[in-house]
Each structure stands twice: as C-alpha cells, then as structure tokens.
C-alpha cells in the first residue's frame, strides 16, 4: 500500500477523534461554560449537521481545484475549527468551532476515498479505502479514550489543541506523500450530479443510512443499557466502547479485504448477521460477558459494510464519483441521527433500554432487503456502472466538441 494512504489515515484518525471525544467530555465542557448537559449536547448535534450539509457543499466548491489541494484545504478547516474550540471564550464560539471542523469531515472522507482508490490497482480499491478508514476506527480505540482521559485530567481544551496538532500532522503528510492528481478532464459539476440519477447509487446510499443506522440505534444508548440492564459500573462504559472500537477495526479490515473479491455477497452476510446480532442483543444485554461479546460483534459487522458500500458508490458513479462519495459519508451521519431519534422514541414509549436494539435489527434487515433489490436490478439491467461510464464519456465528448 502506498505511503500516501498513511497520510490519509492520519487525517481520518484526527477527524474520528474530534467527532466522538466530545461525548466523553460533555460534563467538563458544560461545567466550564455554565450550561446544561442537554445544551452541551448541541456540540454533538451541530457537528453531525455540519457533516451532512458540509459534505456536498465543500465537495462542490472543491471541483475547481485538484483533489490533493482540496484535502489540504479541508484539513485547514479542521485545524482552525479545533483551535477555535480549544480557545473558545464562550459556548457559542465553541459551537461555531465544532461546525467549522465538521465541514472537513464528509468531504475529506468522500474525496479521500476517491484518491485512495486511484492510488492502487483496480482489484485493490476497497482495501485502499479500508486503509484510510482504519484511521477512523483506530480513533475509537485509541484517540477517543486517550482524548477523554487527557480532557478529564488536564482539561478539555488541551484535548482539542492536541487534535488540532493531529490535523497539522495529517496536512503535512498529505502535502508530502499524496501525489498531485489533476482534475479529470471534461468532468463538470453536472457530471457529478448525474450520478444521483443512477438508481444503484441511491440504493447504495439508502443501504448506508439503514445499515449503519442499525449500529447506532444500539450504540447511542449503550451507556444506560449496560449500566441499568447488564449491571456494569459507570466506569466500565469506556472499555466497552473500546471493545466496540476494536470490532470496528477488525470489521473494516475484513470488509476491505473481501469487498474487492465479492462485494455483494459480503454485504448480504454482514447486513444479515448484523440484523440477527442486534435482535439477540435484547437478550444478551442481560449478561455481562455476552453483552461485551455482542458489542464487539456489532462494531465488526457494522463496519464490515463501510468499505463495500463506499466502493459500491464509487463503482456505480464511475467517471464522476467525488460528490456521490462525499454524500455517502453524509449518509452515515444521517443514519446515526435517524437511529438515535427512533431509539429515543421507543425508550420514551416505555419499552425499555433494550428496545433500540429491535429498531437497529429492523433497520439492518431493511438494508439487506435493499441489497437484494439492488442485485436483482443489476442482473436485469446488466452492468449499470458501464452505462453510467458511457453516459459520462458521451457528455465529455460533447463538451469537448462544444
């Protein structure tokens, strides 16, 4: 694998750390600014919304420059946003800092996926994408726990300053190691938008929303579930999340390895198994050992879908995949928000802390259904990626003649 993938992984590590570390530091942040925990929670919500809306916006703005330069610009936003959070004199300023940092998230992973895929041979694209996403998964195992520990020990501002330093390291790595890939000739914004007319692209994004939504339906409420149902102490939640992160790392690597060989079968297995494991979590959540094993399995099965789904979008949007790739990253966050809302509804309805697991199982099963529909449509129509590639090529030729 090219060293350039390491630079992308470092950037992904920093982004993954800043996204999730705030959840462990909310009490400290709320206390320093004199706001309630629910108010401090807007730092999480604001970031998620920034990812959803920032991914397409920043990608569209980036169509005028090379992908390497855009990645560097995005990490610039990331660094500024985290420094603003670290130095914020008021809660409103920190919220602005979180939103600024979030603008880098979706576009970085979207453009980074395209760059990673172009750095390797065609039969190794999913593995390259997975290598970049390894930075995100390792962040949940190393970056988030360490960031939380630093924040609780010497202050949360130090945590965000260190995350900004990670951004500087990633920026230097990309400047040094990522080749300066020119923009594809003849590709315009209309070509990028044309990908959204492809049913297969939309189905892949819907699978992303539902499949990863299934994961976060359970994980969002893991703390009350594990303390009130499984009987773990409050302090145990940290290492349970580390188990979840280790599962994510393993699932990501497996997904990257097999997506290049058998993409759709991998999705069938991972989404089907995820639905079953989430349903069983309503039972295993009552036993400490079984609950811990289940949490690791959810992380592994959930992230095993990430490289194949991202590659699926790239394949189906062949020729002009950058915007579709970035929007698919936003789809992960949409799934997180949707599942957290649905999980809160069933808990609020008095169905208990394990009820979100059923929500997750239904979402994952729905994603599996969409995967089967997608494959059936593909068999009926031939290879849609070839059709899209031909259409893009025809539009380029037209543009050249004009």
Image (tube, rainbow, N blue to C red):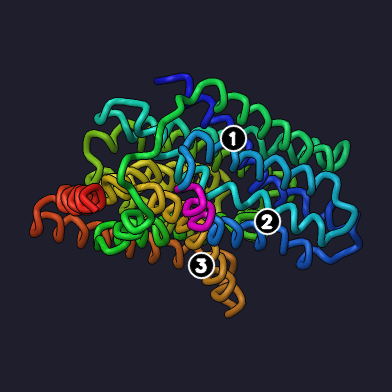
Q: Is residue 58 magenta?
A: yes
Residue 152, labelled with which disc? none
Find residue 193 and report its horizontal and vertical position in percent: 35, 59
Q: How many marks?
A: 3
Find residue 217 and report its horizontal and vertical position in percent: 51, 61
Task: Give the quadrant of the N terminus.
Answer: top left
Q: Which residue is mark 1?
A: 13
Q: Which residue is mark 3?
A: 338
Q: Is residue 129 left or right of residue 199?
A: right
The residue mark sitting in front, 2 or 3, is: 2
Find residue 296 and report its horizontal and vertical position in percent: 50, 42
Q: Which residue occupies the foreground of this view, 370 or 310?
A: 310
Q: Is residue 225 magenta?
A: no
- Badge 1 marks a residue whose secondary structure is helix
Give whichever of discs 2 and 1 has the lower sequence position. 1
Find residue 298 and report its horizontal and vertical position in percent: 46, 48
Quarter where residue 186 is shown: top left
Q: Residue at x 35, y 54 (%)?
A: 192
Q: Are marks 3 and 1 in contact (CB under 8 Å)?
A: no
Quarter where residue 208 is shown: bottom left
């Amino acid at each position: 694998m090219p060293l350039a993938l390491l630079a992308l992984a470092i950037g992904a590590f920093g982004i993954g750390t800043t996204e999730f570390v705030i959840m462990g530091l909310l009490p400290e942040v709320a206390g320093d600014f004199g706001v309630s925990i629910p108010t401090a929670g807007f730092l999480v919500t604001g970031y998620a919304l920034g990812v959803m809306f920032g991914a397409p916006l920043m990608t569209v703005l980036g169509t005028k420059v090379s992908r390497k330069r855009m990645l560097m610009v995005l990490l610039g936003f990331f660094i500024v946003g985290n420094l603003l959070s670290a130095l914020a004199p008021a809660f409103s300023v920190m919220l602005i800092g979180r939103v600024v940092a979030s603008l880098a998230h979706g576009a970085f992973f979207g453009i980074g996926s395209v760059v990673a895929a172009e750095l390797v041979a065609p039969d190794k694209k999913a593995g390259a994408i997975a290598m970049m996403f390894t930075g995100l998964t390792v962040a949940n195992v190393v970056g988030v726990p360490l960031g939380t520990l630093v924040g609780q020990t010497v202050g949360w501002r130090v945590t965000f300053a260190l995350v900004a330093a990670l951004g500087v390291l990633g920026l230097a790595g990309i400047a040094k190691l990522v080749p300066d890939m020119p923009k594809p000739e003849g590709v315009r914004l209309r070509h990028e938008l044309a990908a959204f007319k492809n049913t297969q692209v939309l189905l892949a994004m819907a699978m992303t929303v539902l499949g990863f939504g299934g994961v976060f339906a359970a994980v969002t409420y893991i703390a009350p579930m594990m303390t009130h149902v499984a009987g773990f102490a409050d302090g145990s939640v940290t290492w349970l999340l580390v188990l979840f992160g280790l599962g994510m790392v393993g699932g990501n690597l497996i997904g990257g390895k097999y997506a290049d060989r058998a993409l759709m079968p991998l999705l069938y297995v991972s989404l089907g198994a995820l639905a079953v494991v989430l349903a069983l979590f309503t039972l295993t959540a009552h036993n400490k050992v079984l609950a811990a094993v289940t949490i690791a399995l959810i992380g592994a099965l959930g992230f095993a879908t990430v490289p194949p789904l991202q590659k699926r979008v790239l394949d189906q949007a062949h020729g002009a995949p950058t915007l579709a790739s970035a929007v698919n990253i936003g789809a992960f966050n949409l799934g997180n928000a949707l599942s957290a809302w649905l999980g809160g509804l069933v808990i609020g309805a008095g169905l208990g802390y394990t009820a979100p697991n059923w929500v997750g199982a239904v979402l994952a099963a729905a994603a599996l259904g969409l995967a089967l529909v997608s494959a059936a449509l593909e068999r009926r129509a031939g290879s849609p990626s070839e059709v899209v590639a031909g259409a893009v090529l025809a539009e380029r030729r037209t543009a050249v003649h004009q």
